[in-house]
Amino acid sequence: MKFSGKNVLITGASRSIGAEIARTLAGFGLKVWINYRSNPQIADNLKAEIEKSGGNAALIKFDVTDEEGFLEGIKAIIDCDGELSYLVNNAGITNDKLALRMKTEEFMDVINANLKSAFIGCREALKIMSKQRFGSVVNIASIVGERGNPGQTNYAASKGGMIAMSKSFAYEGASRNVRFNAITPGFIATDMTDVLKDEVKESYIKNIPLGRLGNTKEIADAVAFLLSDHSSYITGEVLKVNGGLYM
Ligand code: NAP
């Protein structure tokens, strides 16, 4: 795949989907900035793995809910590379509970971790990429943001917000050649879905036309396409990667 830019920041990239995005984009020759917040060892192992395969990786530690830390992280990247070509807002959490039992703080914590952080990332990327007259951002939303899910009012609101926000950023960035798109994964085998009970997973799988959970590489390949030159006329789009679960 062809990329005119040279570097990418991926939030929450030390494990699961984020780590696979980092591996894939490094494989296409981009310098990948691996954001992590809590486990330097896993992040370091990923960096070493990428470098061993001939890729270029760097670590950047911040918590995406800490605005100051996020801004400092982006500044450090610009100070080092002089530009930011691509951003993937991938960091995300769940905190599932039926709405009747959900405290307002439990709602807001998920909104802050998923939606507010993506807003900060998109806004800062737009500032930098507007000056460059080039850039592409992918927000990792969710099928749950498209169709809702019981027990996930907080998560659904955050991911639905990311979809609408991506489209608004797409309008604002278009005249400066800065693209914003969202990906809505279905059920992907990661630590996040590993906590689901087997019977819940089986009930989901029964309804997935392709008959299985997705894997992290299938998300990473979609991200690569939406960042790359091959999607240069695509902005404000929502790419479903869900095995047909929601069409
Ligand atoms: P995961 O296995 O739980 O990994 C989440 C990653 O995000 C971890 O690296 C975690 O870092 C990081 N993270 C969380 N909060 C953070 C914060 N405040 N600051 C920095 N990093 C933070 O999740 P996943 O399955 O890979 O999901 C990745 C993205 O895809 C999420 O946005 C998720 O909502 C979305 N998604 C996943 C699925 C799925 O089926 N798995 C489906 C739809 C959408 P730590 O190691 O420090 O915890």
Image: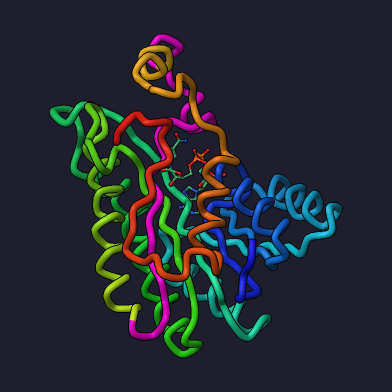
Quadrant hosting residue 209: top left
Quadrant hosting residue 144: top left
Q: How is the image coloured?
A: rainbow
Residue 225, image x and y in percent? 53, 57
Of 65 and 116, which appears nearest the observer?
116
Left or right: 76 with respect to 125?
right
Residue drawn at (22%, 36%) of the image: 147
Residue lying farthest bottom? 131
Residue 169, image x and y in percent? 30, 71
Residue range highlighted in magenta: 175-200
Residue drawn at (37%, 68%) of the image: 120
Left or right: 70 with respect to 104?
right
Residue drawn at (46%, 12%) of the image: 198
Q: Quadrant of the C terminus?
A: top left
> Is residue 233 part of the magenta span, yes or no?
no
Left or right: 22 with respect to 243?
right
Of 127 and 41, which appears nearest the observer?
127
Rendered position, 103 above or below 195: below
Residue 168, image x and y in percent? 25, 68
Of 113 and 185, which appears nearest the observer?
185
Rendered position, 20 above or below 62: above
